[in-house]
Amino acid sequence: MRLIFTSLVSHGHLYPLLPLAVAARDAGHDVLFATGDEMLPVVEKAGLVAESAGFGMHAAFVSFFGPDAEPRATDGPPESFYPVIGEVFGNVLPRRFVADLEPLLERHRPDLVVYESGNAGGAIAARLAGIPAIGHGFGRFSPGEVIDVINGRLAEFAGEVGFEGVELPSFGDPVVDICPESVQAPDFLAGANRIPLRPVSWAEPGDLPAGVAGRDKSRPLIYLTLGTAFGDEGVLKRAIGGLAGIDADVIVAAGPTVDPAGLGDVPGNVRVESWVPQADLLPHADLVVHHGGSGTTLGAFGTGLPQLVLPQGADQFTNAEAVVAAGVGAQLIGADATKDAIHEQARKLLADDAVLGAARKLADEVAAMPSPAEVAQRLPEFAG
């Protein structure tokens, strides 16, 4: 069977699709992955054939609004940017992906398109080509006003190309859901044709920081990251200051948006890296302090780790709420995320048996979800 996978052009949207794409290839299917140029090397490192389609989120903002229009957290209240975000994610990105995917689908004529749920252009392009399609979530489906704005603009674009009254955000397609049911959004569970898939952490191959594998396990290891898109030097500095005062080792992944040198000298129990192989590091950690990105949140769910979430944007706020509701962690938002508050919350989480028990229960739920290999065997069911 011929398959085309397609995702938006970012680590957080692409990585969740790679386990199923690789499993489908290993099952003997002909797999092609279509995403923007910046992510093609990542796909190729996974051993998959890749072709260019779409462009990155920053390029989408700049192409439509100019270089000064991309929202920044310090520019105003989040709701002031909803129209801009709705235009980019509900029109600019889908329109570009449809334009790029149409000739690609014509050349390859796949039996099935697997589109990442944020990439509505993949769903529309498949419909225009008359090819069956399924969605693939990248985490918890997060309802909210900004999603409503995006879906409103997307409905307009879908109507423009001939699809009036489509069911959004899933277009009525089955959806591969990598979020454990107990923490998934109830509204999504109520209406979705859901294909559960165990969230498998994906990271580019690399070595763990020195000393992690053979460390003294009587001393906790705290992993701190703000991810690949929302890194903030000030937040990281406060978090490092708070965590360094705990009798623990701290590993910091600064990410591509923060220069480690800008963090200055750090205490002896803190180690700063530009990047770490997160999937390999999580099993060694005792606590994750992070931004609430879907990949890190789900990775911590699967590893049974307590979480302290410092949300910075996008779906991170609803992910943080889900962490708290599940009893597996705490959140600190905005001005509440002080050095002292981070210290106190992290210290409590490391010692809270109830939180650890809830985290282990959630890890058991994740382990019981179908594997990528199992779901790959089902894909012909959806090809029509």
Image (cartoon, rainbow, N blue to C red):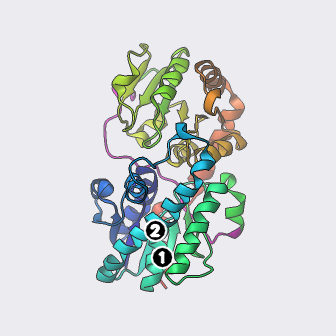
Provide the secondary structure element on which disc 1 rests.
helix
Q: Nearer the viewer, residue 270 or 162?
A: 162
Nearest the viewer among 347 and 109 is: 109
Q: Quadrant of residue 268?
A: top left
Q: Residue under label 2, please give it.
A: 94
Residue 139 visible in the shown view = yes
Residue behind mark 1? 124
> Which residue is at a point 57% across and 67% down the rendered structure image?
153
Q: What residue is shown at x 43% (from left), y 77% (from top)?
A: 125
Label 2–label 1 contact, CB within 8 A: yes
Residue lying at 44% horizontally and 43% vertically, measured from the top left: 229
**Mark 2 crowdedness (10 Å alpha carbons): few <14, some 14-19, many ≥20:** many
Residue 27, horizontal then vertical, whole percent:
37, 70
Magenta segment includes 30: no
Going from the N terminus, do you reach mark 2 or mark 1 first? 2
Q: Left or right: where does residue 242 sit relative to residue 274?
A: right
Amino acid tagged 1: Ile
Q: Which disc, if any, is residue 84?
A: none
Q: Is residue 107 above or below residue 351?
A: below
Q: Nearer the viewer, residue 296 or 160?
A: 160
> Where does the image place residue 379, in percent across and percent down from the top left?
47, 74
Asked if residue 203 is positioned above or below residue 257 in the image, the reply reads: below
| Range drawn in magenta | 191-214
In front of the other: 100 or 213? 100
The image position of residue 333, as x and y in percent, is 63, 34
Horizontal and vertical percent for residue 198? Answer: 53, 56
Task: Please name the predominant secondary structure of the magenta segment in the image.
Answer: loop
